[in-house]
Image: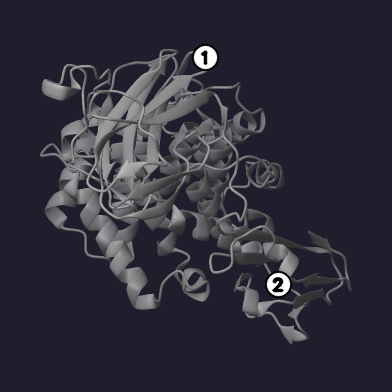
Amino acid sequence: IELAAGQTLTLDASVLDGLAPGTAAATVALGPLAAFDVPGLLTALEAYPWGCTEQTVSRAMPLLYFAATAEGLGIAGADEIGRRLDGAIRDVLANQAGTGAFGLWNAAASGDGWLDAFVTDFLSRARAQGHAVPDRAFQAALGNLANLVNAYGDFEKGGEDLAYALMVLAREGRAAIGDLRYYADTRADAFATPLAQAQLGAALALAGDQPRADAMFRRAGLAAASGEPEQLYRTDYGSGPRDAAGVLALAAEAGSDAVDREGLAAIVTAPGAERSTQEQLWTLLAAHALAGDAALGGLRIDDAPVPGPALRLTPADLPLRVTNSGPLPTLAVVTAFGIPTQPEPAQGNGYRIERQLLTLDGAPADPAAITLNDRLVAVVTVMPERDLQARLIVSDPLPAGLEIENPNLLRSGETGQLAWLSADDVATYTEFRADRFAAAVDWQGAEPFRLAYMVRAVSPGSFHRPAASIEDMYRPAYRARTDTGTVTVRE
């Protein structure tokens, strides 16, 4: 919402309309950087339910720079933020292989050079701020990046992992200036993404070669401004908006004026679909890098000076008046969070998802007539609407009267009673939580896949069954969900 000079914005209970009492809250961002919606993004990352290595880093890295904001929003106290950062460091190091590389869900899946550089970037930033990063693990991570650079072959289009590795090594004084200049002089246009070009620019700036750094930032800024064609899968977890945010963040950090900051900021803050964890993280890094340009001016809350550019509101805080008493227009961005009072209908974009409860004989179970201690097979079927490649997360929340029988996926060819079962062994990672089943699946193609697991009826009563969902973790606009339902367990 743009507030003209002298204008007052009244936020009342309608801000939280449609959200269930006890779950509803809102954040408000104010001032020149309000469009970046720092409080909204911090809150969204805090609520993100999954935790692969990339997501763990994306949730933790902003806390290095926005600890005070996170504390003010009630996300965590100062001591808790330190513990969360230390916990994130432990979690990602648990996924480190002996080579110094990192796996997405576990160490056995290592071999992703871009992910290696991303995690090492986080460890480098955390270490610089005084957080305890075991030296042996950190040196192994740097050595792995150095090996990647030394063994890198020639390329005509690519180099995303190379550019990131060079930037992290340059920050740690481990990059050869000759390598940086070679790639800038001979392969500047071969780097496939604007972010990669900006990361090489950042490496050159760290090494003290500002003219070449500015030349790379200029290329990156122009490429980011031109956007990208629809690209449904990228090995670097990226997208056009993520790249634009990264270029803006790195150029501002390096003090380069070679990019159009206002133009990139307009791309980064454009309203649209839900953002991936990568898009959220790099947007926050851009906001941090630009924070020196921000001033709150004459903003007031209920006739008192605003306590800061980020607020969190509960129903008890409403109504509230925000007044722009300064001479220039400014922004307010309000983001509401909560559980909808009306369940959303089944729908999908790019995917469809169905689920069934079956008896041990393979017949459909009547969800209104389940008997206590019944064992059932839950089957979730995902159907791509066209040929797609993605890193997917499948989630099937449990009604409170059921619990998962054993932490194993069922597969086709199971002997005994389940010989009828047709299910695929495609999950790269699974979680069997008390409240839901979840699986990560790397999938390519238009063919459907099916996941199955066993549940048992453990509590009598009638229970809400939340919707099952499928989501492309790095293109969250591509998702689908089922209807909600009801399950009744009889004595």
Please, what is the three-letter code of the amino acid marked with disc 2? Leu
Residue that mark 1 sits on: 386
Q: How many residues crowd mark 2 within 10 Å: few (<14), some (14–19), many (20+)?
A: many
- Asked where in the image residue 83 lies, by quadrant, the reply is bottom left
Q: CA distance from mark 2 to mark 1?
A: 48 Å
| SS assignment at label 2 | loop
Can residue 41 be seen in this snapshot? Answer: yes
Q: Residue at x 18, y 17 (%)?
A: 419
Residue 208 visible, this angle: no
Q: Is residue 354 left or right of residue 490?
A: right
Give the label on residue 296, or none. 2
Residue type of the residue flagged with mark 1: Arg
Secondary structure beneath dot 1 equals loop
In x, y percent, where is residue 342?
Answer: 62, 51
What colour scheme has been applied to the protein in the rendered image? one colour
Q: Looking at this view, is 371 or 79 the one in front?
A: 371
